[in-house]
């Protein structure tokens, strides 16, 4: 099979989109002749991220996959069926033998994966977290291969189609560039240690408010970069000063920022945790409590066990605990990590599996 087109799907959060973008960038370098497209929701962050990188994007209808009873399940069932019909007709235009589907998770992927399978197209799933998402569990039924970041995910999928591939890391993680300018900030002029706080691509009200409560004290010690999420940008812009700058979302400068910030405070989505672990950087993690199967806590636990990263559970997050953690993390030595990027391994699996009958 000669791959002519790869359709990526994933969304709901930046955590599902960033591994797709990393793979897209690597595939473009390796095989620039391949046509790369993306599917996602109408309202998620994925549309902006894919379009910014010039990836043709098709939004489809989708519903949330809930494991509990809710009257919205009935409405979302209709949305999922509508999304399946949309995906089916979009994919019909693409050659069965020359097109593959690559899903990075999120409920928007289910219609695309099923539609691709119905048309005989090969489907690949990548699970980023140590606790498996429902969308990927459903998708694995229709997939040729399931690629995993953590060994702990192995029992959740059929062994005959599962590969421990690792997490696709951006190439610059192997040799992070210096942090030059970000917006109007020239970091060569900054004389204070940098503290970076992020609640993820969509932001976190809880983390934002915790930072706001500590801001006067933290500004005495740090130059603070705050990724607050688009919904909170206007609210926090009013606090900006010479030692505090706020952004809705940071993309291209993320790796050098993670590398050079003396203190990183973050949610513990798989992508952020894996990047910080690859940089050998102990950090402060505040796992999202309502994340499926408490997956963010288990992601953070990997970093705690290997690097000594600090975990603050949501119930324990307050002004005192955050201040103490930002001080304690500075005393934990950074680790030297052998940097092996799984991105090439994942791409190799895609091409080799696609060549099988």
Image (spheres, grey):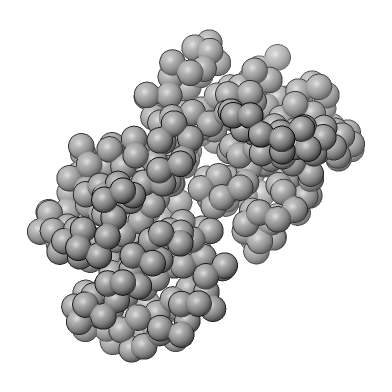
Q: What's the residue at 81%, 22% (across, down)?
A: 118
Q: Which of the 4 image quarters holds residue 262?
A: bottom left
Closer to the camera in the image, 72 or 23: 72
Quarter location, residue 284: bottom left
User: Where does residue 352 sit, x and y in percent of width and height?
Assistant: 59, 24
In the image, is residue 334 above or below residue 95? below
Residue at the image position 64 percent from the left and 25 percent from the top: 139
Out of 95 and 40, give the one closest to the viewer.
Answer: 40
Left-right relation of 340 to 53? left
**Which residue is at a point 72% across and 48% down the rendered structure image?**
41
Residue at point 26% right, 42% down? 303
Residue 83 in the image: x percent, y percent? 81, 38
Badge count? 0
Q: Nearer the viewer, residue 30 or 225?
A: 225
The percent coordinates of residue 342 (x first, y second) are: 42, 37
Left or right position of 136 against 85 = left
Q: Is residue 35 left or right of residue 29?
A: right
Residue 237: x percent and y percent?
47, 81
Say which quadrant the N terminus sits in. Answer: top right
Q: Is residue 139 left or right of residue 37?
A: left
Please state, as top left, top right, bottom left or bottom right, where the C terminus lies in the image: top right
Can residue 253 be seen here? no
**Where 267 falls versus 154 (above or below)?**
below
């Amino acid at each position: 099979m000669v791959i002519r087109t790869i359709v990526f799907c994933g969304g709901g959060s930046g955590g599902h989109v960033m591994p797709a973008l990393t793979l897209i960038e690597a595939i473009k370098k390796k095989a620039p002749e391949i046509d790369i497209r993306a599917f996602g929701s109408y309202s998620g962050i994925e549309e902006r991220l894919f379009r910014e990188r010039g990836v043709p994007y098709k939004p489809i209808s989708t519903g949330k996959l809930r494991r509990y009873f809710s009257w919205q399940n009935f409405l979302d069932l209709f949305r999922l069926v509508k999304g399946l019909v949309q995906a089916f007709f979009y994919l019909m235009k693409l050659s069965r033998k020359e097109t593959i589907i690559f899903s990075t998770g999120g409920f928007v992927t289910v219609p695309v994966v099923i539609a691709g399978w119905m048309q005989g197209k090969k489907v690949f799933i990548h699970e980023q977290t140590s606790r498996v998402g429902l969308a990927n569990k459903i998708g694995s039924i229709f997939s040729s291969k399931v690629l995993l970041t953590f060994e702990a995910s192995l029992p959740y999928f059929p062994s005959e189609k599962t590969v421990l591939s690792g997490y696709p890391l951006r190439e610059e993680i192997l040799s992070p560039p210096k942090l030059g300018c970000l917006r109007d900030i020239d970091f060569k002029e900054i004389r204070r240690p940098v503290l970076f706080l992020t609640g993820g691509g969509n932001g976190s009200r809880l983390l934002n408010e915790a930072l706001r409560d500590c801001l006067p004290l933290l500004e005495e010690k740090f130059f603070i970069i705050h990724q607050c999420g688009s919904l909170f940008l206007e609210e926090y812009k009013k606090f900006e000063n010479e030692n505090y700058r706020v952004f809705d979302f940071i993309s291209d400068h993320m790796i050098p920022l993670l590398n050079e910030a003396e203190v990183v405070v973050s949610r513990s989505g798989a992508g952020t945790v894996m990047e910080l672990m690859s940089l050998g950087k102990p950090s402060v993690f505040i796992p999202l409590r309502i994340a499926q199967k408490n997956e963010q806590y288990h992601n953070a636990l990997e970093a705690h066990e290997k690097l000594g990263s600090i975990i603050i559970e949501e119930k324990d997050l307050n002004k005192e605990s955050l201040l103490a953690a930002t001080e304690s993390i500075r005393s934990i030595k950074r680790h030297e990590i052998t940097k092996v990027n799984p991105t090439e391994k994942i791409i190799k699996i895609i091409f080799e599996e696609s060549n099988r009958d």
